[in-house]
């Protein structure tokens, strides 16, 4: 299946959604709770509307699955060979905290794989994107630069961790790494920026020891894989999309150096 989507047009949609988010960010943030007790703001909904409208204009033949319109049965989804997978505002908790660590995530899925991805952090004007040409990073008005993962240096390890979801299991994992390898530099970060840090070689690993949804990871996984990294579940398998009724991901490792087996530190 050939991907015939203009990456620049997709980036423009992500930036427009980011502008909608920042308009809410500039004022008072009203917070509601969804059925799963996760937070919901007007920024989530405003970005969702911008993205869905933009994608329906750009590719009217491709269906859209967004976090804010996820009530599409697997009976329907399983017939899709190609679709957009969207998180209009990844890191709503970080948005509410006003720490800037939130993103717009848009991915094109073909089969069970993410083949085109855009991750945009509007508060930082920081963009990551990936397509058949590779993985790229753009800061503000600077020219986009190609990014690659880094080779693991066992004496100098950097791990990206979730700012809002840190727990005892992550602490034990890091303790095991330090016992067997070396001291760990832990960087706490929100949203899919953690996976992008691995993609650009700023971190060696992001271990996700908890649940996420498919829209949380798809765009950044594309960036990571195009940069030479891997995103693997605890069985060592690449994360797949739209392969089951549930939209929850298993726990995973986002790795820069695929040759190193991080599962050994889970004991």
Image: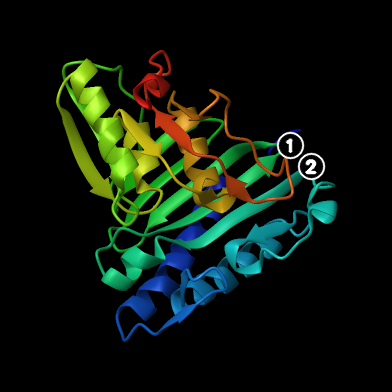
Q: Which residue is mark 1?
A: 111
Tags 2 and 1 in contact by the CB under 8 Å rule? yes
- What SS does tag 1 mark? loop
Q: Residue 64, located in which quarter of the rendered image?
A: bottom right
Label 2 vs 1, first from the N-terminus: 2
Counting from the top left corner in percent of width and height, residue 110 is at: 70, 39
Q: Is residue 195 above or below residue 176?
A: below
The answer to whether residue 130 of the structure is visible from this angle is no
Residue 81 is labelled as 2
Residue drawn 68% across the image and 38% down it: 3
- What SS does tag 2 mark? loop
- How busy is the neighbourhood of tag 1: few (under 14 within 10 Å), some, or many (20 plus)? some
Q: Could you tell me which quadrant the N terminus lies in?
A: top right
Residue drawn 37% across the image and 79% down it: 23
Counting from the top left corner in percent of width and height, residue 65 is at: 67, 58
Q: Could you tell me which quadrant the C terminus lies in?
A: top left
Q: Is residue 115 above or below residue 227?
A: below
Residue at the front extreme, as displayed: 267
Residue at the top extreme, as displayed: 259
Residue drawn 19% across the image and 24% down it: 178
The answer to whether residue 236 of the structure is visible from this angle is yes
- How busy is the neighbourhood of tag 2: few (under 14 within 10 Å), some, or many (20 plus)? some
Left or right of residue 155, residue 27 in this image: right
């Amino acid at each position: 299946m050939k991907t015939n989507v203009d990456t620049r047009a997709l980036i423009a949609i992500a930036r427009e959604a980011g502008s909608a988010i920042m308009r809410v960010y500039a004022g008072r943030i009203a917070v509601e709770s969804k059925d799963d007790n996760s937070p919901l703001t007007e920024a989530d909904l405003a970005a969702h509307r911008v993205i869905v409208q933009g994608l329906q204009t750009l590719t009217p033949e491709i269906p859209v699955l967004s976090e804010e319109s996820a009530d599409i049965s697997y009976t329907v989804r399983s017939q899709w060979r190609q679709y957009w997978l969207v998180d209009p505002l990844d890191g709503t908790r970080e948005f509410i905290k006003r720490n800037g660590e939130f993103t717009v995530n848009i991915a094109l899925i073909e089969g069970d794989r993410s083949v085109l991805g855009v991750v945009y952090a509007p508060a930082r004007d920081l963009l990551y994107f990936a397509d058949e040409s590779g993985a790229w990073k753009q800061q503000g008005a600077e020219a986009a630069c190609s990014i690659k993962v880094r080779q693991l240096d066992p004496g100098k390890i950097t791990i990206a961790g979730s700012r809002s979801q840190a727990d005892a299991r992550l602490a034990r994992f890091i303790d095991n790494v330090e016992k067997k390898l070396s001291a760990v530099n832990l960087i706490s970060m929100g949203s899919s920026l953690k996976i992008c840090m691995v993609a650009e070689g700023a971190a060696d690993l992001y271990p996700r020891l908890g649940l996420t949804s498919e829209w949380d990871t798809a765009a950044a996984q594309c960036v990571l894989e195009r940069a030479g990294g891997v995103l693997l579940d605890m069985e060592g398998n690449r994360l797949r999309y739209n392969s089951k009724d549930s939209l929850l991901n298993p726990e995973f490792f986002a790795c820069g150096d695929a040759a190193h087996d991080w599962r050994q530190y889970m004991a």
